[in-house]
Amino acid sequence: MDERQLVGTAADLVRTEIDECFLVLNPANDAVISLNETASDVLFLCDGTLTAGQVVDAVAIHYGQGRDAVAEPVLVV
C-alpha cells in the first residue's frame, strides 16, 4: 500500500477535472486523490485564511443550501 499522504497547503496542490471527478495532486510527494466537486471545493477553501465557519458559509452560498444543511458534511471533511 502506498503510504504517501496528500498534505500541504491548497496553494501547493494542483487540481484537475476529468469526467466530473477532481484529481488533486501534491507535486512535492506525487500523492494523488480523487474527490467529488464539493470535497474538492472544501479542500481548496481550507487554505489557512478562513475559519471553519467561513468555509461552511462559502459552501452554503456556492451551492445555494442552508448553513445547517452543509455544516456537518463540511466539518467532517
Image (cartoon, rainbow, N blue to C red):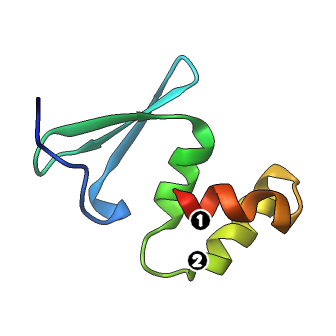
Rounded to the nearest angstrom, the CA distance separating label 2 from label 1 is: 7 Å
Marking on residue 27: none
Tally the marks.
2
Percent of width and height locating residue 7: 24, 58
Q: Is residue 69 above or below residue 35?
A: below
Query: For this view, does 41 lie left or right of residue 57?
Result: left
Residue 55 x, y percent position in the rendering: 63, 70
Answer with left or right where residue 75 lies relative to residue 23.
right
Compare residues 76 and 14 and report the one nearer the observer. Answer: 76
The x, y position of residue 67, in whole percent, is 83, 67
The amino acid marked with disc number 1 is: Leu
The residue under the point 56% across, 34% down is: 36
Does 1 sit above or below residue 19?
Answer: below
In what quadrant of the picture does the N terminus appear?
top left
Image: 54 above or below 6 = below
Decide: is 46 above or below 39.
below
Judged left or right of residue 48, residue 36 is: right
Q: What residue is disc 2 on?
A: 52
Circle 2: is it few (<14), some (14-19), or many (20+) Cα within 10 Å?
some
Looking at the image, do the residues carrying marks 2 and 1 touch, with CB atoms under 8 Å apart?
yes
Q: Which mark is residue 75?
A: 1
Residue at left 47%, top 68%? 46
> What amino acid is at disc 2?
Ala
Question: How far from the left and from the top, in percent, is residue 62?
Answer: 77, 56
SS at mark 1 in the image: helix
Q: Nearer the viewer, mark 2 or mark 1?
A: 1
Q: Residues within 10 Å of mark 1 (few under 14, many from 20)?
A: few
Residue at x 33% of width, y 36% of height: 33
- Position of 14 with respect to 57 (left or right) is left
Q: Of the residues under marks 2 and 1, which one precedes in the sequence? A: 2
